[in-house]
Image (spheres, helix red, strand yellow):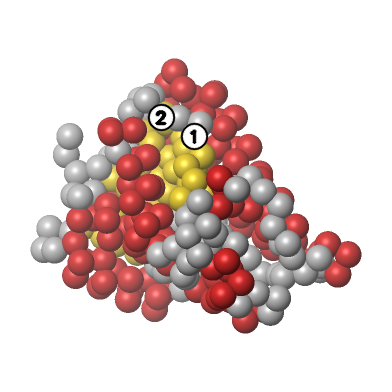
Amino acid sequence: MSSPIALITGGATGIGKETAKQLAAKGATVIITGRRQPEGDKAIQEIRASAGPTGQASFVRNDVNDEEAVRGLIADIVRQHGRLDMAVNNAGISNENKTLDQSDSAAFRAMLDTNVLGLYYCMKHEIRQMLTQGGGAIVNLASIAGLNGIPWAPAYAATKHAVVGLTRSSALDHAKQGIRINAVAPGAIRTDLIAGQIQLGQYDEKMISAMHPMDRMGEPVEIARGICWLLSDEASFVTGHVLNIDGGFQAK
Ligand SMILES: NC(=O)c1ccc[n+]([C@@H]2O[C@H](COP(=O)([O-])OP(=O)(O)OC[C@H]3O[C@@H](n4cnc5c(N)ncnc54)[C@H](O)[C@@H]3O)[C@@H](O)[C@H]2O)c1
């Protein structure tokens, strides 16, 4: 197969950027998206530097909350590259640490818009393209909060439970059509998102580490490896799976 074409939403930072580095190093042509051009430009330099001279990566400014923009993004990728082989629906936010009675409806709505509707728009237009070309692989970013209750995070947990539902149900719908749809469920990973959580209060790094049997946070590279495996032909019989990468959290 010639260079696979891979889309990573929210790929300018954190888990998405690390996944882009690994995919580019393995020979994929990587398109990362995000809302901030400077972060995107910086990420592209890093991805190209780490993937070596053959690393193919570009940044496209795109907001997953805008369905028409997502549809246009995928149409542009197909116009330029002919197809879309892999998609990582990674863009996500966590903007509140509060019990439900204290929580802000606007914060919940913002998380629903990005983590659920945004991911749904991406999946919808990715799957339409993959049906046209006869196959593809999708990985969604769920979370330990998609499989468990997490204190002070009822709204975030609700959105990540929805990601699991979208993943498993769509995997069934498209299993016979050459499209594999899986998710990863990371524990707490050292990224801007967790730094923001610590800033919001309630948690510090020691507490977050102690939630995991390995007594530490994960690193983006550890999640990216799982995503790359799920996208690869090595996972050719894997669909509808939610891969825990969580330092043992789910085993408790
Ligand atoms: N860090 C963790 O502990 C952890 C754990 C489980 C799941 N996750 C999930 O992993 C994914 C990546 O998060 P991360 O930890 O790398 O944090 P991050 O903040 O570095 O990455 C999220 C990226 O999504 C982008 N984004 C947000 N809203 C967007 C929008 N509307 N359109 C386009 N891009 C948008 C952000 O700008 C950012 O680049 C998220 O879905 C997150 O919920 C993270």
Query: Dot 1 corresponds to which residue?
Result: 241
Q: Is residue 234 above or below residue 37?
A: above
29 displayed left or right of 243: left
Q: Position of residue 236 (x, y in %)?
A: 33, 28
* Residue 199 higher or lower than 185, as above or below: below
- Measured in 3D between alpha carbons, the distance from the residue under mark 2 to the one under mark 1, in whole angstroms, is 7 Å
Residue appearing at x 11%, y 63% in the figure: 53
Q: Nearer the viewer, residue 23 or 134?
A: 23
Residues packed near mark 1 inside 10 Å, few (<14), some (14 to 19) or many (20 plus): some
Which one is nearer the viewer's eye here, 51 or 245?
Answer: 245
Compare residues 36 and 224 and report the one nearer the observer.
Answer: 224
- Whether residue 61 appears in this view of the structure is no
Q: Residue furthest right?
A: 101
Confirm or deny contact between disc 2 and disc 1 (CB under 8 A).
yes
- Using the image as rendered, state which of residue 243 and residue 233 is in the foreground: 243
Residue 201 location (% of width, % of height): 69, 79
Give the number of the disc on residue 29.
Answer: none
Q: Counting other residues with Cα less than 10 Å from the Cα at mark 2, is it few (<14), some (14-19), or many (20 or more)?
A: some
Task: Identify the residue at image location x=40%, y=65%.
Answer: 219
Outermost residue toward the top in this view: 176
- Residue found at x 60% / y 48%: 252
In this view, 79 is above or below 234 = below
Q: Which residue is mark 2?
A: 238
